[in-house]
């Protein structure tokens, strides 16, 4: 009997399911968008039932498209965007809309905790920065502004934990996800009332579901969920994992010398170690899905979504998405040599890793420049931002012999070459198109004893398509541009405060 695994991935707008065999072959993929609701400035929410129905349709699709007998699906696991918050009442219904991690309603709490030394007090336990889209400031906001929501809340879930709850009717919180929320004592791997008290929300500790590891079975598909999805009742569902862990394990990040990079909506740059790295200058250290390992991450929403914006606004001409549009962008970028132009692009359309008020910019435009020059600047600017994150990480470890890359940028050989040249490091590209779902499926495979370990699962399910080697002739060109990139940020920093909308 051929065995299959399903990985489910819920991002900020898209819900996907993917079906795999035990060799990592992607049999079928399906996904649906959910509407982002912005009822007030700074609020980013979604309808939780709509999100569940998007998952239902995606699961039904991959079973149908893959033409598999649901009895042969031996395990399921979920991943999803970290942070945000999904509240459930005592009847199992949403207590409020789902909150996406880009929500900024609680930013004043974050500013307060950084200014009154709360951040320094909790850092040894949390090992990460604090930002507005995390559940800690959101819960403080609800306590002060909408306490009736908390009163009727039974469980505080992360995105993927809510989907697992809908599949199994069992309430659990998974450790990799919770270790990135500031709700958990990451050092001691437990909930900590004293930690929550520092944020003024100690009363929510009873609303935090029991903790489970990624590859533990956390329940079985219920009769009701089976009827909706087409799955078989009783199919085991594993804990799943934080999306940054899913991307890492799906690129084969099982050894300390490796470094993983995801160039998608977010610039994610990470490595694992047996000792945690704790620094106020780092984005996050969290618990990795492999027991005994920590995941050190530098990240910001500054990656390939910048290209998506440019393509949508200036290249589609109102037409629906074309399969050839990105081939066109690659050809245009490839038509311009690295040293032909010094345009600098700051990829801060959706956020930044340098300044809360920073704005995206093209710097150095002249009348002779073309669309091709702008596109190359975008490709390079995204790579520079990744390099800035990697430079931070390299303060705590040796330079890797190669970097595994995934995400939208990894689909472009032209862009991968730019990454290799900017970082002067070989870049390995994996075959999977759905890193989150593959990472979840790997967890399901281990939980159901189809693999002995993450190492064995990775060896079976993760495959490298090709390796891109750096062009040494471009090193000086990109070092100069990278220095201009950093200098531009420093010079513009005083202006950004005045440009706030």
Image: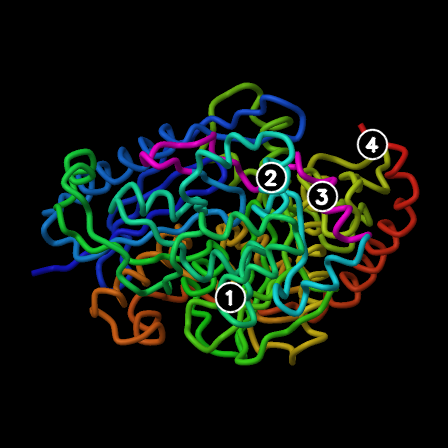
Mark nearer the N terminus (4 vs 2): 2
Which range is magenta?
88-115
**Which residue position is annotated with label 1?**
404
**Which residue position is annotated with label 3?**
109
Mark nearer the N terminus (3 vs 1): 3
- Pick the residue in front: 454 or 424: 454
Alpha-carbon span between mark 4 and mark 1: 37 Å
User: Which element carries disc 2, helix, strand or loop?
Assistant: loop
Q: Is residue 468 in sight in this rendering?
A: no
Alpha-carbon span between mark 3 and mark 2: 15 Å
**Image quadrant containing the N terminus:** bottom left
User: Which element carries disc 3, helix, strand or loop?
Assistant: helix
Residue 500's disc number? 4
In this view, the mark in front (3 or 1): 3
Crowdedness of circle 2 by 10 Å Cα count: few (<14), some, many (20+)?
A: many
Mark nearer the N terminus (4 vs 1): 1
Mark nearer the N terminus (3 vs 4): 3
In this view, the mark in front (3 or 4): 3
Depicted 358 relative to depicted 6: above or below: above
User: Which element carries disc 1, helix, strand or loop?
Assistant: strand
In this view, the mark in front (1 or 2): 2
């Amino acid at each position: 009997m051929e065995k299959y695994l399903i990985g489910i991935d819920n991002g900020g707008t898209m819900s996907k399911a993917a079906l795999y065999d035990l060799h990592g072959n992607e049999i079928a993929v399906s996904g649906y968008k959910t509407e982002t609701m912005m009822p007030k400035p700074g609020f980013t929410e979604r309808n939780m039932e709509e999100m569940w129905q998007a998952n239902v349709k995606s699961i039904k699709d991959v079973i149908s498209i893959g033409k598999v007998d649901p009895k042969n699906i031996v395990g399921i696991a979920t991943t999803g965007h970290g942070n945000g918050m999904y509240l459930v009442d005592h009847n199992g219904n949403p207590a409020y809309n789902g909150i996406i991690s880009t929500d900024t309603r609680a930013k004043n709490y974050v500013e307060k905790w950084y200014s009154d030394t709360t951040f320094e007090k909790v850092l040894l336990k949390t090992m990460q920065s604090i930002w507005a889209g995390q559940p800690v400031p959101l819960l403080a906001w609800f306590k002060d502004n909408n306490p009736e929501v908390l009163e009727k809340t039974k469980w505080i879930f992360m995105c993927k934990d809510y989907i697992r709850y809908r599949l199994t009717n069992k309430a659990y919180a998974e450790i990799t996800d919770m270790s990135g929320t500031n709700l958990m004592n990451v050092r001691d791997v437990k909930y900590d009332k004293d930690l929550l008290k520092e944020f003024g929300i100690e009363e929510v500790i009873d609303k935090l579901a029991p903790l489970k590891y990624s590859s533990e079975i956390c329940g079985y598909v219920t009769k009701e969920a089976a009827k909706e999805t087409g799955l078989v009742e009783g199919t085991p569902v594993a804990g799943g994992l934080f999306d940054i862990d899913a991307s890492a394990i799906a690129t084969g990040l099982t050894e300390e010398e490796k470094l993983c990079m995801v160039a998608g909506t977010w610039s994610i740059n990470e490595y694992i170690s047996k000792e945690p790295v704790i620094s106020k200058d780092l984005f996050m250290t969290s618990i990795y899905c492999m027991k005994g390992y920590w995941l050190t991450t530098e990240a910001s929403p500054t990656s390939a979504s910048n290209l998506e914006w440019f393509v949508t606004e200036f290249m589609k001409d109102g037409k629906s998405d074309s399969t050839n549009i990105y081939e066109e962008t690659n050809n245009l970028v490839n038509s311009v040599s690295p040293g032909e132009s010094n345009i600098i692009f700051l990829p801060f359309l959706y956020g930044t890793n340098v300044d809360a008020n920073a704005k995206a910019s093209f710097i150095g435009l002249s009348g002779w420049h073309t669309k091709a020059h702008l596109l190359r600047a975008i490709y390079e600017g995204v790579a520079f931002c990744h390099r800035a994150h990697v430079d931070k990480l390299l303060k705590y470890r040796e330079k890797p012999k190669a970097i595994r890359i995934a995400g939208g940028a990894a689909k472009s050989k032209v862009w991968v070459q730019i990454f290799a040249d900017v970082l002067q490091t070989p870049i390995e590209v994996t075959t999977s198109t759905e890193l989150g779902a593959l990472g979840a499926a790997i967890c399901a495979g281990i939980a159901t004893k189809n693999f002995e370990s993450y190492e064995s699962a990775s060896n079976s399910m993760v495959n490298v398509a090709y390796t891109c080697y750096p062009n040494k002739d471009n090193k000086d060109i990109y070092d100069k541009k990278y220095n201009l990139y950093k200098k531009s940020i420093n010079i513009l920093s005083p202006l950004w405060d005045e440009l706030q909308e």
